[in-house]
Amino acid sequence: MMGIDFERADSGFSDDLRIAATGAVRGLSQLVLRADVSGMPLEWIDYKEAARLYTQEQVAYTCGTRLYTLVGGVNALSGRRTVLEINSIVATVGHTGNPGSTRHDYVPPLNNQTLFRRDAHICLYCGLRFATRELSRDHVRPFSQGGLDTWTNVVTACRRCNNQKASRTPEQARMQLVAVPFTPTYAEYIFLKGRRVLADQMEYLLAHFPRSSPLHARIQRWLS
């Protein structure tokens, strides 16, 4: 199947930062994208949780490609064997639990993994791509100068550039940012938290990204 393997990209395999036939489904490890009944993305779930939603009749409709065919026991009354076909995207009924759809001021939690993925594992000072172990979180305006630990004040930086910048602003260090830091939306955050995102899941998430988002433009390049 076609998709992007974030886990391999985290480890420094730069060739995985594109849509490719990467053997995206490995055993039962490929995650399913769950959405609410209106189509808003909610979370990633494993095949067991997806099967539970199917059996409890909480799945309103499905999209994407078939990932798994799960075979159960034989019904004592009908004599038929239970078969569940699980797709890559499932929409469910009930309470959404999606803070992004109920709070316009929602800000996703900040952590290094999603920060590095937001910036495509590229140091925003030298413009080179690195593995996660070689990257660090840099505060554009340092704490010592009143900077905050927020999405719009942090960027991915290689250790060399971070050390060179030290406790200075880019202007003070005479270093230029190659991109402007931004706060991901809830749908973008779901994308950034994925392990191996299939092409159909990516297209589905892309429809919920702001068109002005750098991630929107990046994914369109991957899909083209």
Image (tube, grey):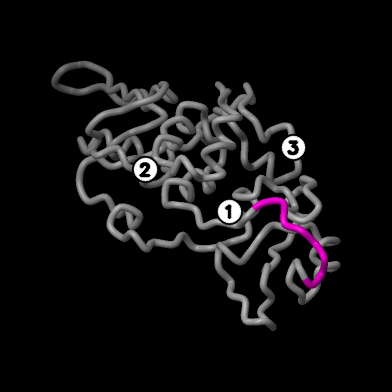
Residue linked to disc 2: 41
Residue 81 sits in which quadrant?
top left
Q: Are marks 3 and 2 in contact (CB under 8 Å)?
A: no
Q: Position of residue 170 (x, y in %)?
A: 75, 66
* Main SS class of the magenta portion in the image: loop
For the residues labelled 3 and 2, the Cα–Cα distance comes to: 27 Å
Q: Position of residue 48 (x, y in %)?
A: 39, 39
- State the extent of the magenta-drawn residues as a range: 172-179
Q: Amino acid at mark 3?
A: Ser
Q: Are marks 1 and 3 in contact (CB under 8 Å)?
A: no
Q: Which mark is residue 14?
A: 3
Q: Residue at 67% across / 69% down in the picture?
A: 139
Q: Are marks 1 and 2 in contact (CB under 8 Å)?
A: no
Q: Residue at 51% across / 34% down in the picture?
A: 30
Q: Which mark is residue 114?
A: 1
Q: Position of residue 101 (x, y in %)?
A: 30, 52
Residue at the extreme left of the image, as rendered: 77
Q: Earlier in the sequence, mark 1 or mark 3?
A: 3
Q: Residue at 55% across / 31% down in the picture?
A: 220
Find out whether residue 24 is within the magenta segment: no
* SS for callout 2: strand
Around disc 3, counting alpha carbons within 10 Å, would you say few (fewer than 14), some (14 to 19), or many (20 or more)? some
Q: Which mark is residue 104?
A: none
For the residues labelled 1 and 3, the Cα–Cα distance comes to: 16 Å
Locate the N terminus by quadrant: top right
Q: Amino acid at mark 2?
A: Pro
26, above or below 130, in the image: above
Q: Nearer the viewer, residue 96 or 30?
A: 96
